[in-house]
Image (cartoon, grey):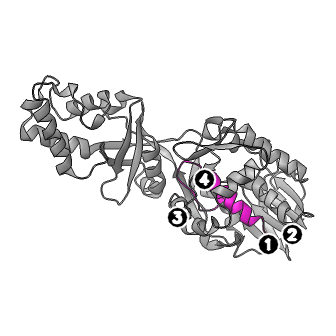
Amino acid sequence: MDVAIIGGGAAGYFSALSVKENFRDANVVIFEKTRFSLAKVKISGGGRCNVTNGNTSISTLAAGYPRGKTLMKRALRTFNTKHTMEWFESRGVPLFIQDDMRVFPVSQDSGSIVNCLLDQAEAQGIICEFWSGIETIAQKGKQLELSFSRQDLPPRSFDKVIIASGGSPRSEGLEWIEKLGHEIVKPVPSLFTFNMPDEAIVELTGVAVDPVLVSIPGTSLKTRGPLLITHWGFSGPAILKLSAFGARIFNEKDYNFDMRVNWLDQTNHELVLGHLNDLVAEHARKLLPNIRPFGLPDRLWRYLLQKSGLPQTKKWSELGNKGLNKLVTVLTNDSYSVSGKTGFKDEFVTCGGVSLDSIDGKSMQSKVCENLYFAGEILDIDGITGGYNFQAAWTTAFIAGKLN
């Protein structure tokens, strides 16, 4: 059996290895359009490679996929995070789980993951041909004929083909798949930080608060977690998660929208007001900046006082009901304007791709093209930051490689 894998990334190599595991005598060729394989794996996680997530609860993991949740919930029963860790560790790559549940190689070097995949591929006789971008796929009887973008490469036919070419930032990059009859969901960016050029809070670069509750007025979008103030706006897990779940909404708004920040992650305003009244009673003669409620960072607390119009020279006893209400508002319902986005480091992820309606989720096989399978980010599956997107690649590739 001759099998072609389109794409030399994480899903491409893992699906190739899965094929060889299930069909030892199969001839497997990976076609990579660039001169490098596993490039995204190498630079991911700041060069450390967040290979998966440490959670083992399938329902918890599935909730981390804004697109593809239902499919992943089923697919993770076949190959989940525990399986991923066992796979790499049994092949000489020890892993460790951080406090935030992200999983990295003990070496703290993505090269450990890259080399493992390359070594396994070489040991299994899997060949990777570079500068071999695919122009078209045509059904020729029960075989699939691949035509290449390079004129010097003749068409080649295969018994099975797995497309693992990664996400495309533009719909045009998916036309060759759409022409086969697959439905394409328009790709838009996911996992990005918020630009806030007109907000003075960017002067607090480096300040982090954990946890906060962030929300978008007029929508149901709401997330909680750590927030980091940067020189361009807001970042951190809470923002990245919000950007993932709101990817299409933010795209429709052209990345211009208002947001609310609850710096305390506390929705009980009476409890907040009660705490502030306790501070008034205990520290009546002290200046407002000198007593920070709820352990807020000093720079942020001073900024919020200024934003509330409360002088730094005012004492707690001088607040009054009006001053207390101002503080409750700024602490629990602070407002900001977002004007643009910034890609998050190396976590370049797209929302969109091949519609899951076009594939059989049990096998990853195309519903419209026999013997054609999909794996990885080419599918309309994407997750939040924290190893979810690599896990989707490993899981879908493992299943696609069964060639069921």
* Mark 3 residue type: Ser
Which three-letter amino acid code belongs to the residue tagged 4?
Answer: Asn
For the residue pair 398 and 88, the one nearer the viewer reads as 88
Above or below, 287 relative to 355: above
Query: Residue 189, position in %: x, y?
Result: 53, 51
Residue range (magenta): 375-404
- Residue 389: numbered disc: 4
- What residue is shown with label 3? 59
Q: Earlier in the sequence, mark 1 or mark 2?
A: 2
What percent of the width, then of the height, locates residue 403?
79, 70
From the viewer's perspective, is residue 116 above or below residue 76? above
Q: Which residue is mark 2?
A: 159
> What's the residue at 21%, 32% (across, down)?
305
Q: Which residue lies under the disc numbered 1?
A: 371
Q: Mark 1, mark 3: which one is toward the viewer?
A: 3
Which of the two residues, 345 or 396, is positioned nearer the viewer here? Answer: 396
Specify which label sits upstream in the sequence, 4 or 2: 2
Give the CA separation, mark 3 to mark 2: 36 Å
Q: Are marks 1 and 2 in contact (CB under 8 Å)?
A: yes
- Number of the front mark, 4 or 2: 4
Q: Quadrant of residue 195?
A: top left
Location of residue 40 by image quarter: top right
**Labels 4 & 2 near each other (Cβ < 8 A):** no
Please check the rendered image and state whether residue 376 is part of the magenta-colored stretch, yes or no: yes
Can residue 168 be seen in this snapshot? no
